[in-house]
Amino acid sequence: EVQLVESGGGLVQAGGSLRLSCATSGFTFDDAAIAWFRQAPGKEREGISCLSTRDRVTDYGLLVRDRGRFTISGDNVRNTVYLQIDSLKPEDTAVYYCAVHENLRVGQNCFAVWYDYYGQGTQVTVSS
């Protein structure tokens, strides 16, 4: 059974940083695509960043402003993916989800796939 468990969210002041974690199990971690999405109240879900766990290639969502504030990384020993968010802004307030696409083909872009499984999300709230 595929399981994704996010953690690391919370209440933080603008300008602060957070590192979100996505602990995974139930699939072959080394040939997957894992992505971070977020959804704010009243808004559509937005893709932030994704990672190919085989070759560590990353990509970032086109709609994400200030992409330099977001850094995705993976730990193939712990089967965990992280999202570092720096210089947090109130507009970053949202529920953050990780998701997995299994069996990513070699050379395939990690945002050009359908994500089959999502975690329950972790709330990030940024105060001004």
Image (cartoon, grey):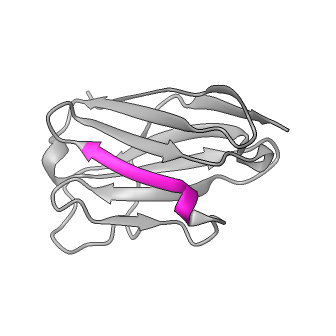
Q: Residue 11: say if magenta.
A: no
Vertical placement of residue 65 versus 75, above or below: below
Judge from the rendering whether residue 80 lies leftward or rightward of residue 87; answer left or right: left
Residue at (26%, 72%) from the top-left corner?
Answer: 108
Q: Quadrant of residue 78?
A: top left
Residue at (45%, 41%) from the top-left corner?
Answer: 98
Nearest to the observer: residue 19 or residue 55: 19
Residue at (55%, 31%) from the top-left corner?
Answer: 121
Tell me where residue 84 appears, x and y as whole percent: 48, 44
Q: Quadrant of residue 76?
A: top left
Callout count: 0
Split into 4 quadrants, where in the image is the C terminus?
Answer: top right
The magenta stretch is: 68-74
Vertical placement of residue 51 versus 80, above or below: below
Tell me where residue 54 appears, x and y as whole percent: 15, 57
Nearest to the observer: residue 56 or residue 121: 56
Tell me where residue 2 appears, x and y as whole percent: 29, 32
Nearest to the observer: residue 69 or residue 36: 69
Judge from the rendering whether residue 39 lies leftward or rightward of residue 50; answer left or right: right
Vertical placement of residue 46 versus 75, above or below: below
Tell me where residue 31 appears, x and y as whole percent: 16, 53
Split into 4 quadrants, where in the image is the N terminus?
Answer: top left
Q: Quadrant of residue 83?
A: top left
Q: Residue 73: say if magenta.
A: yes
Residue at (64%, 29%) from the top-left corner?
Answer: 123
Vertical placement of residue 90 versus 108, above or below: above
Dominant secondary structure (helix, strand or loop) of the stretch shown in magenta: strand
